[in-house]
Image (cartoon, rainbow, N blue to C red):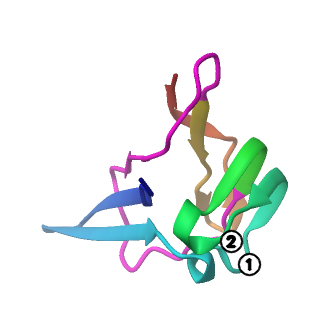
Amino acid sequence: MRAPLLSALLLAGPGAAHAMTLVHQTPLDLEGSRVEGLRRLPFEKGLLEGAGTLESPAIAAETPFDDLVASWGAEIPTGAFLELGVQVRVGGKWSGWYRMGRWE
């Protein structure tokens, strides 16, 4: 079974809440991503497998936001884990990495 890789942003601008959802479900969704140590799979078998790092290109938020909610779907073998981290850019400077979760 193929599970989509899902990242969801909850954006809250002044006076109104907005939602922006990003789903990485096809090989084209990974275009421009930095992939290290992972093997790309044929589409019918998923997107990637192995141990390594996937870093998407910077994604511009449509509005300022206060909250970011991340989610991920993956088949993880026993003894393995998946960790999701994000960075934000404020005033042209990147933050450190925020750890959004670790799934085992």
Mark closest to the chain's N terminus, 2 or 1 = 1
Instruction: Give above or below for 66 relative to 34.
Output: above
Q: Which of marks 2 and 1 is in front?
A: 1
**Res. 46 visible in picture:** no
What element does badge 1 sit on?
A: loop
- Mark 2 lies on a secondary structure that is loop
Distance (Cα) linking label 2 and label 1 = 6 Å
Give the prevailing secondary structure in the magenta stretch. Answer: loop
Q: What stretch is highlighted in magenta?
A: 55-81
The image quadrant of residue 54 is bottom right
Tag 2 near tag 1, CB within 8 Å: yes
Q: What is the three-letter code of the residue carrying label 2?
A: Pro
Q: In which quarter of the image is residue 13?
A: bottom left
Disc sitting over residue 14 in the figure: none
Mark seen at residue 32: 1
Residue at 66% x, 65% y is 56
Instruction: Tell me, yes or no, whether the highlighted magenta stretch contains residue 56.
Output: yes
What x and y, as percent, mark residue 42?
Answer: 66, 70
Q: Picture coordinates of residue 99 (x, y %)?
A: 56, 33
Residue 27 at x, y percent in the picture: 62, 76
Looking at the rendered structure, which numbered label has been put on residue 57?
2
Taking depth in this image into account, of 24 and 15 the one nearest to the observer is 24
Left or right placement of residue 24 versus residue 42 in this view: left
